């Protein structure tokens, strides 16, 4: 602690250390007990805080749902009131038509009497009465026409209000809720847990679709009223206004249809050629407007980054493709119970891909593609829609050894893509705190437990190639993340992190979730920590020097002695699991700081074979693989750290140098070798040690067993 800001903390820590020394020097286990209890209490509080956060998120979603429902109900009530006005106008128009018909008859009769005036004695009197009657009709028609004109204006204003109410709700659903769901779907590629439910959003979209369609029908009714009344009197500007409202509803409906064509199951973001993959698309409003009656066909193709940009620029797919996908068409099918109109692609396969020319340090694993889904269908006989959607960025590989770099590209894109970006632009440099959040999310999803602040600090030191620095305000570049090799190593930071995550997920998930693996700590720090603890105390850390390696460091008999076992690889742990290997080494007794080994790993021990039945059903004797460190105690030892195997030559044993005898702190790893124990006969056991040349301490490949 060398900065001025840390000076006060440094003094407090010094005083605390003195206090602990005075109070607990005779009973250090009591201090450990107290600290352990404090940590357990903090853990409980953290869990409660996380639960509270989840409740808050759930409450926020419930409030959003209530708010959207209330707005929908408000619009629905408004539309109902507007419909009542429509019914009244229709009734008034019917009355107006009848009155107009009576007036027309009166006019015809009057004209007839005028023509027959000389032949009918009472003609003038009848003509006078008919004229009065006509004037009465015309007065009534004029009054009703004014009333109808006003009513139609009120009706049109109500329709305009309906659209004004619909607009913010649609914007919230499409531009916020759906965009957030899509963003969460992308983050889910890094392990994020969905917060929004697409079925809830679908319910909103269906209700919104109903309201837009009803409003559109009401606007069409307004246009019919305009045409009907236009035969009798002029309706200034009503035609233009109604056409504008009709165009607005068409735009709302088009936007809703296009936005609700979503990819429910994304294609794999690391896509291997000639490998089957699946995907699912759904039209959220497919159960409405009878869209499902036409069974729309969905087509699938793969496009490059530049082609994706062109599609977005034109807002229309042009049929271009940069690869060949098998089984790339499917019909939308409707499931009435779930109200899902969707297409499931269960056996697509990418046969070939056309790549762009690479520049500089670019590799094929840096290149991003996208899977394009598109469809065409009609609503009624007047509206045709062409919908499409691009998948999340996809990296195409041809071999499994390309996985790490491909996942680096995908992880970086998922974590740092910004809404509304140009496909598929991502920043070249990102604040470390954002990188740490992404790594923690990824590791937690893969292994079942996240990374502590100490682990993230260790990762920061590794990624930036420096120590004792405040990383919170530093930015990490893409090159530092996965292009530039680590110092004195042939692999990058991401390759190391990916290998650690892979071995933890596949072979160490249980112990890691339990907190039995410290993992992210330097070798020198681990050995220094262990020298302050009792002999046989050990911890587990990820190897710095080997990809996907887990090593055991333990405290020796002397205060300054600490040893590290040669890292176990994924192949090693697939042959014999970690718990059994630790059980094979009796001198490892306490998991750091003071947890009994059997308590920490007992539930992961493999049930030993029944020695009373040495011969299996096929007549063969079954061997037992045991981890053994030459020169150290193991299964079948005499309890003093030396082998009691009768067939093992003692002159091949070697002594592991104490770190205290070395000129540098970093010590060489101790290598372990497998022992093949033949099945026991009676009370005597025949054991064979396959460490025939222990002077050569290279790691023995156990696969041949």
Image (spheres, grey):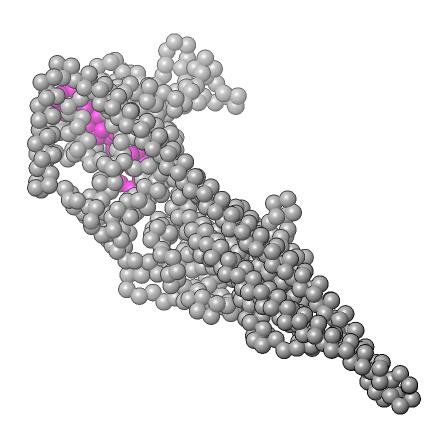
Which quadrant is home to the C terminus?
Answer: top left
554 inside magenta stretch: yes
| Residue ID at (50%, 68%) | 316
Visible residue check, residue 336:
yes
Taking depth in this image into account, of 43 and 602 the one nearest to the observer is 43
Q: Position of residue 2 (x, y in %)?
A: 8, 40
Q: Nearer the viewer, residue 20 or 610?
A: 20
In the image, what residue occupies the spot 35% across and 30% down? Answer: 48
Please tell me which residue is depicted at 75% across the width and 71% down the height of the picture.
Answer: 99
Residue 505 seen anywhere in this rendered image of the structure: no
Image coordinates of residue 35 in percent, x first then y, are: 22, 23
- Residue 613 picture location, percent across and down: 47, 15
User: Compared with residue 597, is residue 427 higher up or lower down, i.e. above or below?
Assistant: below
Assign the N terminus to one quadrant of the image.
top left
Figure quadrant of residue 479: bottom left
Residue visible at 39% across and 43% down in the picture? 191
Give the residue at the far bottom of this rendering.
118
Tell me the quarter of the picture where residue 306 sits: bottom left
Q: Nearer the viewer, residue 616 or 93?
A: 93
Magenta stretch: includes residue 327: no
Q: Which residues are magenta?
A: 544-572
């Amino acid at each position: 602690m060398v900065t001025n800001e840390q000076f006060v903390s440094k003094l407090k820590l010094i005083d605390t250390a003195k206090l602990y020394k005075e109070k607990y020097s005779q009973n250090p286990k009591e201090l450990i007990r107290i600290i352990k209890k404090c940590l357990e209490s903090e853990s409980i509080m953290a869990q409660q805080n996380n639960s509270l956060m989840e409740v808050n998120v759930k409450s926020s979603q419930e409030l959003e749902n209530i708010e959207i429902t209330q707005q929908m109900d408000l619009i629905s009530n408004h539309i109902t009131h507007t419909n009542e006005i429509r019914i009244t106008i229709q009734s008034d128009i019917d009355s107006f038509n009848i009155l107009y018909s009576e007036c027309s008859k009166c006019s015809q009769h009057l004209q007839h009497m005028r023509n027959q005036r000389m032949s009918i004695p009472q003609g003038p009197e009848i003509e006078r009465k008919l004229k009065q009657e006509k004037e009465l009709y015309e007065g009534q028609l004029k009054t009703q026409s004014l009333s109808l004109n006003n009513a139609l204006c009120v009706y049109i204003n109500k329709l305009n209000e309906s659209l004004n109410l619909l607009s913010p709700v649609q914007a919230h659903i499409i531009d916020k809720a759906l965009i957030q769901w899509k963003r969460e779907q992308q983050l889910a590629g890094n392990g994020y847990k969905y917060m929004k439910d697409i079925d809830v959003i679908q319910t909103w979209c269906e209700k919104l679709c109903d309201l837009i369609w009803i409003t559109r029908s009401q606007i069409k009714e307004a246009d019919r009223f305009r045409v009907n009344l236009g035969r009798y009197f002029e309706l200034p500007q009503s035609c233009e206004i109604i056409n504008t409202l009709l165009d607005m509803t068409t735009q709302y409906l088009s936007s809703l249809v296009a936005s609700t064509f979503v990819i429910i199951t994304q294609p794999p973001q690391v896509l291997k050629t000639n490998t089957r993959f699946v995907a699912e698309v759904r039209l959220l409003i497919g159960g409405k407007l009878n869209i499902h009656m036409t069974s729309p066909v969905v087509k699938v193709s793969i496009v490059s980054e530049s082609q994706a940009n062109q599609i977005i620029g034109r807002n229309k797919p042009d049929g271009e493709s940069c690869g060949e996908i098998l089984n790339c068409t499917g019909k939308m099918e409707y499931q009435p119970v779930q109200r899902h109109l969707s297409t499931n692609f269960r056996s697509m396969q990418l046969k070939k891909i056309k790549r762009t020319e690479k520049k500089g340090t670019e590799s094929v694993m840096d290149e991003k593609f996208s899977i394009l889904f598109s469809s065409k269908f009609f609503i009624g006989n007047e509206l045709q829609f062409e919908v499409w959607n691009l998948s999340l960025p996809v990296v195409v590989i041809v071999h499994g050894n390309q996985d790490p770099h491909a996942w680096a590209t995908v992880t970086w894109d998922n974590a740092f893509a910004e809404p509304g970006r140009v496909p598929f632009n991502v920043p070249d440099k990102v604040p470390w705190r954002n990188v740490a959040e992404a790594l923690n999310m990824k590791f937690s999803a893969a292994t079942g437990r996240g990374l502590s602040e100490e682990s993230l600090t260790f990762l920061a030191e590794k990624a930036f190639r420096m120590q004792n620095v405040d990383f919170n305000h530093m930015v990490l570049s893409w090159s530092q993340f996965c292009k530039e090799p680590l110092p004195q190593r042939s692999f990058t930071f991401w390759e190391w992190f990916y290998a650690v995550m892979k071995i933890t997920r596949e072979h160490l998930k249980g112990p890691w979730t339990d907190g039995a693996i410290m993992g992210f700590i330097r070798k020198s720090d681990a050995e220094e920590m262990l020298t302050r603890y009792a002999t046989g105390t050990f911890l587990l850390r990820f190897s710095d020097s080997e990809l996907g390696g887990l090593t055991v460091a333990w405290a020796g008999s002397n205060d300054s002695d600490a040893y590290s076992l040669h890292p176990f690889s994924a192949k090693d742990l697939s042959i014999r699991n970690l718990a059994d290997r630790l059980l094979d080494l009796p001198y490892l007794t306490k998991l750091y700081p003071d947890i009994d080994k059997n308590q920490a790993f007992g539930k992961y021990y493999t049930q030993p074979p029944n020695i009373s039945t040495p011969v299996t059903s096929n007549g063969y004797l079954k061997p037992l693989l045991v981890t053994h460190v030459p020169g150290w105690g193991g299964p079948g030892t005499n309890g003093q750290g030396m082998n009691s195997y009768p067939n093992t030559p003692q002159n091949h044993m070697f002594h592991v140098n104490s770190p205290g005898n070395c000129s540098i702190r970093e010590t060489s790893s101790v290598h372990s070798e497998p022992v093949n124990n033949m099945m026991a006969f009676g009370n005597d056991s025949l054991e064979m040690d396959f460490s025939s040349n222990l002077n050569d301490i290279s790691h023995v490949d156990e696969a041949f067993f």
